[in-house]
């Protein structure tokens, strides 16, 4: 498996496409790609259909995926507030060819989604969606209920701030709604790393009274009372982090004896009331194990490095991958970190010089604990490994 990437910062669309095509050729990319992925800032939104046509015609790519974003990632940089066009391509994928998937409304009982997805078990779905028209949370829940074992990674386009202003590419077509995806068979070795940028504080707690997204009791005590108790026991630095933003992690696998980073699905705490209840951005049920979390630049940096370190320990293949796709929240970058290019720099430092491409998303997709979720303030990575020789 071979991967390559190219980046242009040209504001002129014709010049940008010429530059990335020229860069790919200089890198010796002559044979057809199995999959080409394009991420573009809004500067080139109206020309994406021409981009896809030229990639298919001149590079002979077999499958093409892409979207617009407020910032793109490539060439070791995160291009915020400037034009950017990044191309990432892979060839010699093991197994059968990748399959394009167009997703819109589910239809009755998810029938349209059932017809769009392959019947094969497992595999990876790289999905790019429009945040204004595609019910991504509903889709991910449907995928998990279907039981096929498909992992979903990707992000929601962030190039437009209103309906019909984003652009999605699938092969030679361009769309402004719904979602587009490429399905890769299980024979393609891809590891998913999810860094939610948080760390737990306090202790694990059991939800003993809740309604929808409102937690009324933790351990049979008012939730706000428990939070105040935990807050009083924290060191000063963590108290400051709580005041800047508090989060709640829900344990995915209740059968574990202990819980640490990566075991929680993290959601925002959005309020509290005089009754002692707190509200979060997700539905909670009685009996779930939860733990409060904090997030800031330091913890986000630490969490990404630790997530990559844990993955490297699992297999030597991750230490020198073929390529990486990086979907970072548009609340990260210089909105979170003091220095630019943070996430891509950490990825390259941890994984080496493999081509990295991606974008700042309005929602990041990736599995936690064997289930697919849409995240916020997260870095979601798809790490393409070199196939192991038999």
Image (cartoon, helix red, strand yellow):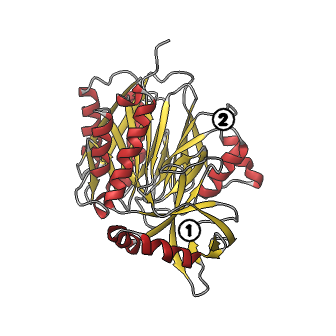
Element marked by disc 1: loop
- As drawn, the label of residue 118 is 2
- Which marked residue is nearer to the observer: mark 1 or mark 2? 1
Comes first in the chain, label 1 or label 2: 2
Left or right: 183 in relation to 378:
right
Of the 4 image quadrants, the one containing the N terminus is top left
Residue at the image position 60 percent from the left and 51 percent from the top: 252
> In screen coordinates, is 42 left or right of 125?
left
- At 58% from the left and 59% from the top, the residue drawn is 250
- Residue at horizontal 45%, vertical 69%? 246
Outermost residue to the front = 233
> Residue 272 lies in what quarter of the image?
bottom right
| Rendered position, 239 above or below 145 | below
Residue under numbered circle 1: 281
User: Where is 96 relative to 362, above or below?
Assistant: above
Residue 51 lies, in percent from the top left, at: 38, 42
Residue 320, quarter of the rendered image: top left
**Residue 325 visible:** no
């Amino acid at each position: 498996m071979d991967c390559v990437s190219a980046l242009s910062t040209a504001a002129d669309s014709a010049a940008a496409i010429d530059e990335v095509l020229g860069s790919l050729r200089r890198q010796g990319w002559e044979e057809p790609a199995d999959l080409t992925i394009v991420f573009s800032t809004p500067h080139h939104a109206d020309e994406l259909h021409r981009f896809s046509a030229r990639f298919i015609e001149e590079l002979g790519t077999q499958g093409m995926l892409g979207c617009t974003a407020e910032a793109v990632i490539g060439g070791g940089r995160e291009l915020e507030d400037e034009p950017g066009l990044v191309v990432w391509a892979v060839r010699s994928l093991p197994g059968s060819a990748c399959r394009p998937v167009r997703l819109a409304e589910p239809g009755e009982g998810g029938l349209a989604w059932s017809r769009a997805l392959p019947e094969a078990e497992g595999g990876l779905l790289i999905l790019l969606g429009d945040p204004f028209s595609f019910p991504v949370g509903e889709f991910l829940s449907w995928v998990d209920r279907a039981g096929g074992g498909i992992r979903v990674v990707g992000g929601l386009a962030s190039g437009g701030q209103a309906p019909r202003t984003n652009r999605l590419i699938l092969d030679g077509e361009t769309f402004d709604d719904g979602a587009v995806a490429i399905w890769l068979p299980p024979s393609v070795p891809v590891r998913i790393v999810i860094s939610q940028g948080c760390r737990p504080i306090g202790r694990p707690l059991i939800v003993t009274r809740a309604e929808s997204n409102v937690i009324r009791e933790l351990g049979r005590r008012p939730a706000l009372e428990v939070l105040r108790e935990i807050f009083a026991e924290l060191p000063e630095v963590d108290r400051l982090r709580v005041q800047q933003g508090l989060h709640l992690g829900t344990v995915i696998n209740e059968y574990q004896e202990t819980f640490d980073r990566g075991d929680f699905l993290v959601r925002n705490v959005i309020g509290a009331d005089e009754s002692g209840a707190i509200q979060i951005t997700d539905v909670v049920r009685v009996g779930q194990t939860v733990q409060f979390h904090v997030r800031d630049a330091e913890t986000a940096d630490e969490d990404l490095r630790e997530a990559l370190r844990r993955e490297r320990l699992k297999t030597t293949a991750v230490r020198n991958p073929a390529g990486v796709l990086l979907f970072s929240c548009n609340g990260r970058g210089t909105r979170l970190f003091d220095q630019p290019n943070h996430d891509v720099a950490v990825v390259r430092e941890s994984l080496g010089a493999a081509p990295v491409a991606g974008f700042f998303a309005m929602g990041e997709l990736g599995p936690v604990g064997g289930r697919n979720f849409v995240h916020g303030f997260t870095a979601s990575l798809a790490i393409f490994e070199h196939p192991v020789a038999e």
